[in-house]
Image (cartoon, rainbow, N blue to C red):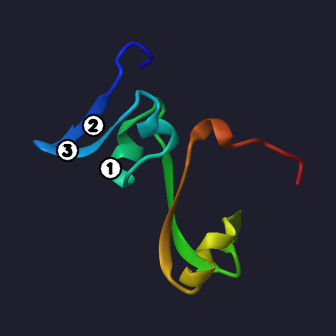
């Protein structure tokens, strides 16, 4: 992914994202791109945005302050497998 200057991610003849080689991984345009780029692919959790966090089935994930306006709305949280960490707690 470091050889080309630009990369295009397509699905069913539709352009989903155009950008620098690492853009689709670091700043994905939508869930289609996020699920396509990376091996293993990104994990998706369905839940709700509450008090600057994302909650689903007892799991609470942090969100940026810019998400405050979306409180109470359903959302999909995407996380790359390499960002998971096993702990004792």
Q: Secondary structure at mark 3?
A: strand
Q: Is residue 53 left or right of residue 48?
A: right
Q: Residue at x 54, y 81 (%)?
A: 70
Label 1 neighbourhood size at 10 Å, few (<14), some (14-19), many (20+)?
Answer: some
Give whichever of 50, 69 is nearer the camera.
Answer: 69
- Residue to which mark 1 is pinned: 32
Q: How many marks?
A: 3
Q: Are marks 1 and 2 in contact (CB under 8 Å)?
A: yes
- Residue to which mark 2 is pinned: 9
Q: Are marks 3 and 2 in contact (CB under 8 Å)?
A: yes
Seen as rendered, the residue at the extreme front is 5
* Front position among marks 1 and 3: 3
- Residue to which mark 3 is pinned: 15
Reading the chain from its start, which is encountered first: label 1 or label 2? Answer: 2
Reading the chain from its start, which is encountered first: label 3 or label 2? Answer: 2
Q: Secondary structure at mark 2?
A: strand
Label 1 and label 2: CA atoms lie apart by 9 Å
Q: Position of residue 3 (x, y in %)?
A: 39, 12
Quadrant of the frame with the N terminus: top left
Give whichever of 35, 14 is nearer the camera.
Answer: 14
Q: Residue at x 48, y 78 (%)?
A: 74
Seen as rendered, the residue at the extreme top is 3
* Res 64 visible: yes
Give whichever of 56, 32 is nearer the camera.
Answer: 32
* Front position among marks 1 and 2: 2
- Is residue 34 placed above or below 64 in the rendered structure? above
Q: Residue at x 54, y 72 (%)?
A: 47
């Amino acid at each position: 992914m470091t050889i080309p200057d630009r990369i295009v991610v397509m699905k069913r003849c539709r352009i989903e994202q155009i950008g620098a080689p690492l853009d689709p991984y670091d700043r994905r345009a939508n869930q289609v791109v996020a699920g396509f780029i990376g091996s293993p692919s990104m994990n998706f959790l369905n839940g709700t945005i509450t008090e600057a966090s994302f909650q689903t089935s007892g799991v609470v994930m942090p969100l940026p302050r810019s998400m405050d306006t979306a409180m109470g709305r359903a959302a999909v949280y995407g996380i790359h497998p390499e960002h998971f960490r096993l702990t004792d707690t």
